[in-house]
Amino acid sequence: MTITESPVVPAPRGSHRLTTAKAMVEAIELEMERDPSVFYLGEDVGPYGGIFSSTTGLQEKFGASRVIDTPISETAFIGLAIGAAVEGMRPIAELMFADFMGVCLDQIYNHMAKIHFESGGNVKVPMVLTTAVGGGYSDAAQHSQCLWGTLAHLPGMKVVVPSNPHDAKGLMISAIRDDNPVVYMFHKGVMGLPWMAKNPRSTDDVPDGSYTVPIGEAKVVRTGSDVTVVTLSLSVHHALDAAESLAGHGLDVEVIDLRSLVPLDRETILGSVAKTGRLVVVDEDYQSFGLSGEVVATVTDIDPGMLRAPVARVANPDVPLPYSRSLEYAVLPRQDRIEAAVHRVARE
Amino acid sequence: MTDITFPALSKESPAAEGVVATWFVADGETVQADQLLAEVQVDKVAAEVPAPRAGVVHLLIAEEATVTQGTPIARID
């Protein structure tokens, strides 16, 4: 078996169409029904249903003691979740925007991520930290960052980043059941929210009932022979749009959706680059010191000779996200920049 | 035959217009009672439209079209 094969065992079952947000809610609902130790807490997660619809209807169903609206004190409620997890519960704490991690980072990387290590593996922290990421809707420098490279850099946390309804549901169930702290980062642009820019790839068929998507397995979402594009989250959608357009120019692009950053599925990256010899990394996070460099090093650490051309990175060029739509689109890794990069790498 | 109308999301202005944001079913599909048919929105308020009964659904309004609240958006035969 190769790691790129579909991780979901195809069972005879029905499916139904959902947005990514509704798929995420369905996963939390299934796990809360199954396991009384699962509960959700965060800002505006109760009657409001999460500002990006991550918890719609959950408080109505499970009550205010299992879906808890918290005051605006991330240090307090993430600390509360860590304590509950240490005592054997399975909390899901929502940090409204990843951009806000600064006010509670001590709880995240000094406590949530290190308790297991510091206790010699005797104390587990089976919690999920959910957080909204990403830009593209003029929310400016403090509400548009991805920052997954930062959390993936700090040891002790698994980090998952679904791009579509199917993976959002399966990765959420895996994250809740995992005995390690898992950071679950959902891009606002993949949630299928009615008030965001229409994104057809954010609504899709989702299998009925419970299933898991293994943490640490990437997926080849489009096979191709000329150039490998390694990416994640909303950029997967842009990369697929670019690949469809490039097919008209005779370029056969393979697209890998990483789905998890920690653990990183290096085998799938290497397998694809061994085939194509050409690599483009698309990352909405800042370019320097982050994910895009890690993906390139994954290849060069093993065998730089695999590469038939210099790699290209399409990322945020190390600037805060601008408010102005035209400036924001200029720094985001959108379809035009991805296509240009693929052309550049294919020509070499 | 059952008409499904755009829900009244704005109580203050009954003539408010809204958008059929997403259809979760296809025209002619057989649906179950309570199955999610659509998500609609007025301004930034969104609501789900479930099937009132089982049957074959016919979509009367295109996705992303704007209509007045109360307008029939689908029919179940």
Image (cartoon, helix red, strand yellow):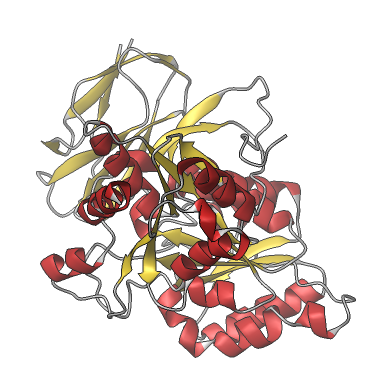
A93 or A324, nearer to the observer: A324
Q: Is residue A27 visible?
A: no
**Residue A220 in picture, x, y percent from top left:** 51, 40
| The furthest residue to the left | B15
From the viewer's perspective, is residue A51 above or below residue A113? above
**Residue A226 in picture, x, y percent from top left:** 39, 39
**Residue A131 in picture, x, y percent from top left:** 49, 67
A212 or A217, nearer to the observer: A217
Location of the N terminus of chain B (image quadrant): top left
- Residue A311, by quadrant, is bottom left
Left/right of residue A80 with respect to residue B26 in the rendered view: right
**Residue A176 in picture, x, y percent from top left:** 68, 57
- Residue drawn at x 38%, y 15% as measured from the top left: B29
Location of the C terminus of chain B (image quadrant): top left
Q: Is residue A238 visible?
A: yes
A344 or A261, nearer to the observer: A344
Left/right of residue A83 with respect to residue A150 in the rendered view: right
- Residue drawn at x 48%, y 20% as measured from the top left: B32
Left/right of residue B34 with respect to residue A321 in the rendered view: right
- Residue drawn at x 90%, y 76% as measured from the top left: A122
Left/right of residue A99 with respect to residue A144 in the rendered view: right
